[in-house]
Amino acid sequence: GVSTSTQNVWTAQQSFDLALLGVEKYKTTYANGNSVKPSSVTAVYNATGSFTLDLTNFSSLLSIGQSLVFTAYIKANADYPLTITNGGTLKYTGNSSDLAITSAGLLLNIFITLDNSGNKTSIVQASKLS
C-alpha cells in the first residue's frame, strides 16, 4: 500500500505498468573529480580534468529488455575531454566530438538499453552550454 501521510520509501524495485504523475523529482548526486561511476539517474559533476564516466553501475542494474535514462550537468573551469566507458555500444546524436566539456558546462543525456538479445547500447546526447 501507499501512504498519503508519510514519505514512501521502497528498498526493492517496484514495477508500474502505468503511472500518472504530475511531478517527478530525483535525488541528485553531486561530485568533484575526474572519474565517476554514477549510481543515481541524475547528477551534477564538477570536472577537475579529463573526465571519465564509467557506466558499470547502471549496466549491472539492467536485465534483458530493460532501459534507463541518465542525465548529468558537468561543470568545469576549463575545457576537458570526456570519456564514457562500460556502456556497451556507444551511439551519438550528432558527433562524438560534441562530448567535450567546456568551461560553460555540458548537459549530458544517455539512454542505456539491454535488448532482448543481451546487447547493451548507450545513446548519448550532449549539449554544450553557453
Image (cartoon, rainbow, N blue to C red):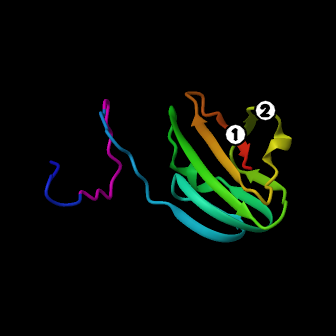
Q: Amino acid at mark 2?
A: Gly
**Quarter of the image holding residue 127?**
top right
The answer to whether residue 11 is magenta is yes
Tell me the element at label 2.
loop
How crowded pointer 1 is (Cα within 10 Å; few <14, some 14-19, many 20+) is rated as: many
Q: Where in the figure is residue 130, as x and y percent of width and height?
A: 74, 50
The answer to whether residue 39 is magenta is no
| Sequence-first tag of 1 and 2 | 2
Q: Residue at x 74, y 38 (%)?
A: 90
Q: Where in the figure is residue 12, as x and y percent of width and height?
A: 33, 54
Q: Which residue is mark 1?
A: 124
| Relative horizontal placement of residue 122, taking residue 52 as reference (left or right) | left
**Quarter of the image holding residue 117?**
top right
Q: Residue at x 74, y 34 (%)?
A: 91
Q: Amino acid at mark 1?
A: Val
As displayed, is residue 13 above or below residue 51? above
As displayed, is residue 80 above or below residue 95? below
Q: Residue at x 23, y 60 (%)?
A: 7
Q: Which residue is mark 2?
A: 94
- Magenta extent: 8-18
Depth order, front residue of 17/29: 29
Query: What's the CA distance linking mark 1 and mark 2?
Result: 9 Å
Q: Where in the figure is residue 86, as x and y percent of width and height?
A: 70, 50
Tell me the element at label 1.
strand
**Quarter of the image holding residue 82?**
bottom right
